[in-house]
Image (cartoon, rainbow, N blue to C red):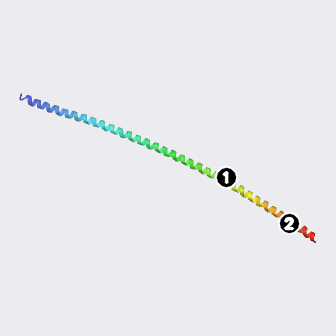
């Protein structure tokens, strides 16, 4: 019995040490898996963030292009309107000048007619 107690104690120590070693190996294995999962999740999140960032860049670029096209369209409309107004102003200016010339010609005709009447009256009075 005296031999049995130290042998049982030695067996217990051996089993306890082996159990601790096995538990440590199992724990390291689980920790490794958890680290790998966390790393995979982190990489997945990075990929998602990059995709969202690229999508936002594309949306921003599309909006910028749309605004540029709209601005160019407005410039073209403004230029066309300006040209149209300029043409109308020239047309009105030409019409006014023509009317002025017509009035000048009519005035000269009236002056000539007045001069003729004056001469005719002068000839009658002589």
- Residue 105 circle label: none
Q: Residue at x 12, y 32 (%)?
A: 10
Q: Is residue 57 above or below residue 25?
A: below
Q: Dot 1: what SS?
A: helix
Name the one closer to the observer, 50 or 101: 101
| Residues packed near mark 2 inside 10 Å, few (<14), some (14 to 19) or many (20 plus) | few
106 relative to 8 in the view: left or right: right
Q: Return the residue found at the far left.
A: 2
Q: Residue 60: percent from the left, percent from the top?
A: 49, 46
The residue carrying pointer 1 sits among few (fewer than 14), some (14 to 19) or many (20 or more) residues within 10 Å by Cα, namely: few
Q: Residue furthest bottom?
A: 126
The residue sitting at 46% across, 42% down in the picture is: 55
Contact, mark 2 vs mark 1 (Cβ under 8 Å): no
Residue 19 in picture, x, y percent from top left: 19, 32
10 w.r.t. 46: above or below:
above
Q: Does 96 sit above or below residue 56?
A: below
Where is residue 33, by image quadrant?
top left
Q: Please report the residue visible at 54 percent of the width from the left and 46 percent of the height from the top.
A: 66
The N terminus appears in which quarter of the rendering? top left
Q: Which residue is mark 2?
A: 114
Rendered position, 28 above or below 106: above
Task: Tell me which corner region of the image, top left, top right, bottom left or bottom right, holds residue 28.
Answer: top left
Quarter of the C terminus within the rendering: bottom right
- Distance between mark 2 and mark 1 Cα atoms: 44 Å
Which residue position is annotated with label 1? Answer: 84
Image mark count: 2
Residue 69 placement (x, y as % from top left) = 56, 47
In the drawing, does residue 74 fall left or right of residue 15? right
């Amino acid at each position: 019995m005296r031999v049995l107690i130290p042998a049982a104690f030695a067996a217990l120590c051996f089993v306890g040490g082996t159990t601790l070693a096995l538990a440590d190996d199992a724990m390291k294995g689980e920790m490794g898996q958890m680290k790998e999962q966390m790393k995979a999740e982190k990489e997945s999140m990075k990929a998602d963030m990059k995709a969202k960032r690229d999508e936002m860049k594309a949306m921003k670029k599309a909006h910028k292009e749309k605004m540029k096209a709209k601005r160019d369209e407005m410039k073209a409309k403004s230029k066309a309107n300006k040209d149209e107004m300029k043409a109308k102003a020239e047309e009105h200016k030409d019409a006014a000048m023509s009317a002025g010339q017509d009035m000048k010609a009519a005035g000269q005709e009236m002056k000539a007619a007045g001069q003729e009447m004056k001469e005719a009256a002068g000839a009658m009075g002589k």
